[in-house]
Image (cartoon, coloured by chain):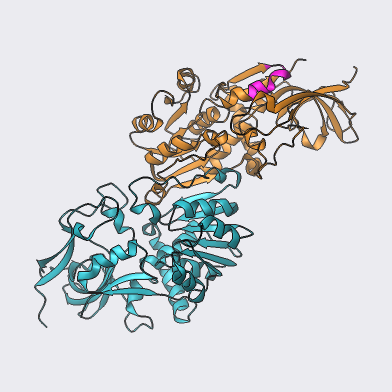
Chain colours: A cyan, B orange
Amino acid sequence: MTLPTTSREWHLVARPSGWPAVADFALRAVPVREPAEGEILVRNRYLSVDPYMRGRMNDTKSYVPPFGLDEPMTGDALGEVLASRAPGFAVGDVVTHRLGWREFAVLRADDAVAVPAGGEVPVSAYLGVLGMTGLTAYAGLKAVARVREGDVVFVSGAAGAVGGPAGQLARLLGASRVIGSAGGPEKARTLTEVYGFDVGLDYKAAPIGEQLAQAAPDGIDVYFDNVGGDHLEAALDVLNTHGRVAVCGMISAYNATEPPAAPRNLGVVIGKRLRIEGFLVGDHWGLRPEFLREAAGWLRDGRLVSRETVVDGIDHAVDAFLDLMRGGNIGKMLVRLDG
Amino acid sequence: MTLPTTSREWHLVARPSGWPAVADFALRAVPVREPAEGEILVRNRYLSVDPYMRGRMNDTKSYVPPFGLDEPMTGDALGEVLASRAPGFAVGDVVTHRLGWREFAVLRADDAVAVPAGGEVPVSAYLGVLGMTGLTAYAGLKAVARVREGDVVFVSGAAGAVGGPAGQLARLLGASRVIGSAGGPEKARTLTEVYGFDVGLDYKAAPIGEQLAQAAPDGIDVYFDNVGGDHLEAALDVLNTHGRVAVCGMISAYNATEPPAAPRNLGVVIGKRLRIEGFLVGDHWGLRPEFLREAAGWLRDGRLVSRETVVDGIDHAVDAFLDLMRGGNIGKMLVRLDG
């Protein structure tokens, strides 16, 4: 087999202010170098696009460094090994790694994670429900919110790659009632009909505060926050004493140029003794073996259901990201590259 | 000794909207009944006025029930037993209890706590630094923020009855640097000169965010919040990774008719993995014996310093409360009644 000599990769060429535009990105062809000792060459099959990437497009210090201008962007990807100069990896192995946004990647084998061959689940699951987004949901529920038997759990962004697993895992970890919110009637229906939430709220149909209060007459014990703003305000209003908020994301603010004015009811944390705690999946890699064991089992026996929205072709990777920002996806948003 | 037949007590007669006014309260004379079996009659010497009382003047469900209209208000008080029909209490004993805002109180002995006789600290300390406000500071630092050796700690409302002890106890529990904020130059000086804070910020002199960033070049690890709003926003900006916020009060919002628009930077809880947790001292009574043992020792040997602002006469109790709301006190605000 002839190895590729050219790879196309997406560069950030301008820092967006507010909503990103197509013109902020460029798809460029670059030479592919040969793997050195200890490295592998991977042909990417799936690229992950995720909301946290928006933060990396700003030139501000954050928990992940910003993307460089006129440099390739990075992100999770899954592909097959085309050449290996590292023990433990053979041509044809399927791996996940962090050099997404490109067709071919040369990386240190230490930075790749092997995906089980011949599994009963599609390999793309390792970028989603069995990957970073699934583990994020699991860690937020288990280590941060500490979901207990009988908890009423509210998940926002519940049709997304983290929210969908979060609602289902909450139930599997003992929640007695799971309420989700998403944008639009189709997504709201997906929550109940596909993922088995008790209630699916369409936040575009009526103020989320009113809908949540109605859906949770006895309050909620845990809020898994992917949205922030009015959703967080609504959750604080109905959280029960000693309730917990695991803050995973605040997508409502990612493209805002003015800081959000909500929540305006933060004072309720005192009387209700609420805990609001932000987290990053990177602090919880120790949970991964336990998570994979449990989640893979639930996925095989159908108690955990995964949805994907797949966009074909690397030329459409930015479109996929922008569509994700607008909420165009149900489940994990992936870009599939031709074989 | 003749027992009193009449007691004056403060009633709430109108629910304030925004800032309370003198006309919302009335001082009324009522008959004093004789104590029944198991009860004691107490002549109050000190009444405590506290910011949380503002919330009880609203007709909204909260962690403490609202004051009833045309009923006596309640609150912490300290006094001496004039008559006892309960074992364990003798005439002349000094006790604290919850029937403040009045001259004489008849209460079940179970609801009174004896104050050590002949102690080396003034009895009024049992309404302040050795009472509810001191224990609040201790519980917030120890059980909620979990202050550790070497932490940099920021305390707002630091000239107040909780904040003053909070900053000093933070140091005694291991903090390496303690920063406080208060309103006005005299209070700010008290923090450093009397309480031994490293830095005392006058939030009226310049935006608290700028001042705090300058005072904490290496960030802060713990924020003990008595104020909310812009102070919380400032703290979130400079909190280090895995920082903790113990939310004790949000006095900036208590008299607001519009919900506050701050903090507008709540999203930083994710990347910095911050924990924001509200608490009530009532959940932490279990810490009281340990707290009294430690704090009484520190108070005696001068490592813990207490200040009081004392207003004389029950007729001025409402004035004292209103002055407290405006920040007129340094340290614990007390009303002293004539003997």
**Horizontal relation, residue A71 to residue B31: left or right:** left
Which residue occupies 42% across, 46% down? B266
Task: Looking at the picture, tell me which residue is in the foreground, A338 or B88.
Answer: A338
Give yes or no for residue B239 being in the magenta stretch: no
Where, by quadrant of the figure, is residue B13 drawn?
top right
**Where A166 falls versus B57 (above or below)?**
below
Residue A325 position, x and y percent, is 33, 61
Which residue occupies 38% across, 40% down? B237
Q: Is residue B194 visible?
A: yes
Residue A320 position, x and y percent, is 28, 67
Residue B82 position, x and y percent, is 85, 23
- Magenta extent: B312-321
**Horizontal relation, residue A254 to residue B53: left or right:** left
Residue B264 position, x and y percent, is 41, 43
Task: Looking at the picture, tell me which residue is in the foreground, A208 or A29.
Answer: A208
Task: Looking at the picture, tell me which residue is in the foreground, A281 or A124.
Answer: A124
Query: Which residue of the protein is positioned furthest toward the front in this rendering?
Result: A205
Where, by quadrant of the figure, is residue A331 drawn?
bottom left
- Prevailing SS of the magenta stretch: helix
Which residue occupies 53% across, 30% down? B163
Give yes or no for residue B315 being in the magenta stretch: yes
